[in-house]
Amino acid sequence: MSTISYFTEEGLQKLRDELKHLKVHERNYISKQISEARDKGDLSENAEYDAAKEAQGLLELKISKMEEVLSNARLIDESALDITKVLIHSIVKIKNVANGATMKYTLVAENEADLKAGKISVDSPIGKGLLGKKVGDLADIKVPSGVMKFEIVELSR
């Protein structure tokens, strides 16, 4: 059974671009590696050939998985989302009640998560704990080190 994944326009385009790169450039590169290894003689004892064939198999598996994700991708109409509570694609500023530290995150689908860019998955413990909360609400979020309390300080799109 396939899972539906929700994307922004930017995230969907990024996925399409990556898939195109794999199909055009990476397939070509591996094909050349296989050809060069084949030219070196006996294939039964050729480690380079075996490695290139294995890399080809892994690449085709990755392409197949990305095509499946794309076939089940849905574009989110952000204009239709409720801006009074935390939902996917909300930009939320939270304050750690224990130490007063503030953080700002954008909640995104798992495929678009990038902590360095401040994008966390709605399926992560923090993402799940924030969903549905409003400005001023407290969220008790279970993390591996215990339970953390966060206050929703600001919410935007």
Image (cartoon, rainbow, N blue to C red):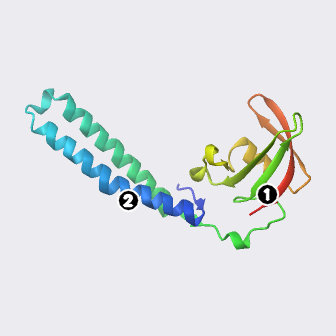
Residue at 60% of width from left, 63% of height from top? 8
Residue at 37% of width from left, 55% of height from top? 21
Q: Residues within 10 Å of mark 1 (few under 14, many from 20)?
A: many
Residue 105 located left or right of residue 100? left
The answer to whether residue 21 shows anywhere in this view is: yes
Image spot of residue 145 (x, y percent): 77, 28
Q: Which mark is residue 143?
A: none
The answer to whether residue 72 shows anywhere in this view is: no
Q: Residues within 10 Å of mark 2 (few under 14, many from 20)?
A: few
Using the rendered view, name the quadrant where residue 34 is placed: top left
Q: Which residue is mark 2?
A: 20
Residue at 92% of width from left, 53% of height from top? 136
Q: Nearer the viewer, residue 8 or 50?
A: 8
Q: Which residue is mark 1?
A: 86
Residue 57 located left or right of residue 138? left
Disc 2, SS: helix
